[in-house]
Amino acid sequence: MKVANIGFFKGMNRKMSIISMLLIFIVVFLTGYFPEKSYMYLKNSKEFLNPFLEWYYVILVAFLLFLMIWLGMGRYKNVRLGSDVEQPEFTFFSWVSMLFAAGTGVGILFWSVAQPIIQFQDNPFTGSDMNAQSAILGMSLSYFHWGLNGWAIFSFIAITMAYFSYRHDYPLTIRSALYPILGKRTDSILGDLVDILAVFGTIFGIATTLGLGVEQMDAGLNHVLNIDTTLTLQLSVMAVIMFIATASVASGVSKGVKLISEGNFWLSIFVLVFLLVYGPTQYLIGVTVEATGFYIQNIIRFTFHTNVTHDSDWQTTWTVFFWGWWIAWSPFVGMFIARISRGRTFGEFVAGVLLTPTLITIVWIGLFGGTALYEELFMGKDITTAVNTDVSASLFIMLDNMEIGFISEIISFLMIALIATYLITSANAGTLVITTILASGSISPPTMHRVFWGIILTLLTGVLIIAGGLETLQSAVITAALPFSFIMIIMIIGLLKSLSLEDTPVRSGNEQISVREPWILDKNVGEEGTLIDELNPDIKKIEEPEYK
């Protein structure tokens, strides 16, 4: 994959960059100039796709969950993302801090109070009976949408990209996973199309995340400082966030991104400890434990629920939206996780990326959502009405209902700061990933283009907010995720085909050489690729290509 040597696109793939820019500018123009028509188009697209997505996303995400468990515990658990002697670049704490902050930090802040309350009011398993059992189920369904299934999507994209990049020396791009299938043709227009789809999905996934976070920040400013929530305020907040995010991503992963991620991780821990101490401690521990057990017992049931009777819109409102959101997020979060995961084995990777964030999520939703449910069930606080009126403000209303005086205002200010830092980490991770893809996998894309794509991302988020807010954002991300989901299926085939060579002896003359040693596919030698053993440089090729 060639990059330009001179001009504005120096260090970038000129063709892919121009096509991506044109597509995004067209979307920005049409959405901003025709907001009502854009809203109706996205809404109609979502309604048209929903019957298909209700079962298609279910099957795809279920398969990815089982695949990741197998990769982490099965025959390939000791395969390392890099050479067999390579060690991780980041400490475990820094690693987890960055992947969680870039992955679900903003979304989980937005939904941690609102979603358990909404699921408590109505769900397809207990109906609209608002009792203690419904509270447990509401928490479990929230775990389901933020837990193992979603992180299986992220971890699959990440482990696939890291495997081909660090173990096989391919560029850190989505297309690299297609070499076992397409061979040399991966460097053609087909590979460009794959990476452009990844950029497109990434842009809409980040825009949705930023839009939700900005709405919640505005609600917090209105609730705490009594500042009227207006479109101008939302756009202003977003511009400030994106300015800081772009500045931090320009400084690199090991500096700005790492420091902000660790900072908001420590702030998150402080807030959780505060809720546990000042909230209904015994209830919070009990409801978290019981809801976790219920989630584990019913994860298969939840995973394969498809709303086959079509007696409600719960499946499309929640599961289809969340799986689409995770898939749209996956190129940028997956690449970002891959970028910080070099040197880890499959087993370490799956334990870290699949299990650790899920455990953090369970604790987070358990304490935030559990506090809100306690207020509804035992304190006589009508938080359900507050959630139904304004989802964005539910977090701050819950803090007020704790009746701890001025301390709740202090914590509300901290929550606004926490939302801002999670927005920054999500935005700068996404900007870094977009430019990495368009720079043909370079881990240090040009600073000018990181800034440029930060501006583009700001414009897109702004016009989507103008076009209709939350519903438009949800419709956009579901629609944008579908094309990339087809790429994911091809990536599954490519990864499994490549992994099958890890244990396959390759015959060269009278010798047998194990390909478990570090090896690469040399796309420049043959149409289908040639096997090269890095530890045995005298062995230049095998008699027959492995990829037919």
Image (cartoon, rainbow, N blue to C red):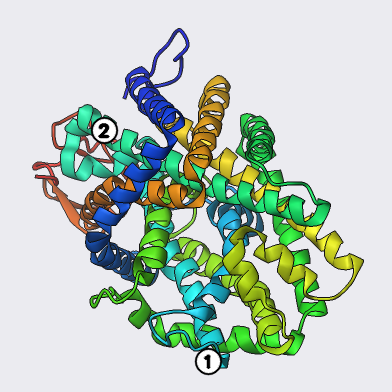
Image spot of residue 5 (x, y percent): 42, 11
Image spot of residue 432 (x, y percent): 53, 35
Q: Is residue 68 left or right of residue 95?
A: left
Quarter that holds the C terminus: top left
Neighbours of disc 2 within 10 Å: few (<14), some (14-19), many (20+): some
Image spot of residue 323 (x, y percent): 38, 60
Quarter that holds the N terminus: top left
Neighbours of disc 1 within 10 Å: few (<14), some (14-19), many (20+): few
Residue position marked by numbered label 1 in the rendering: 133
The residue type indicated by label 1 comes to Gln
Q: Is residue 350 visible?
A: yes
Which residue is rendered at x = 46% and y = 84% of the image?
128
Snapshot quadrant of residue 249? top right
As drawn, the label of residue 193 is 2
In the image, residue 378 above or below residue 14: below
Q: Is residue 79 visible?
A: no
Which residue is rendered at x = 44% and y = 36% of the image?
35
Q: Is residue 489 left or right of residue 371?
A: left
In the image, residue 104 above or below residue 454: below
Which residue is rendered at x = 28% and y = 30% of the image?
192
Snapshot quadrant of residue 3? top left
Query: Please, what secondary structure does the residue beneath circle 1 have?
Result: helix
Q: Is residue 500 left or right of residue 83?
A: left
Query: Please, what secondary structure does the residue beneath circle 2 have?
Result: helix
- Asked whether 337 or 140 is in front, the reply is 140
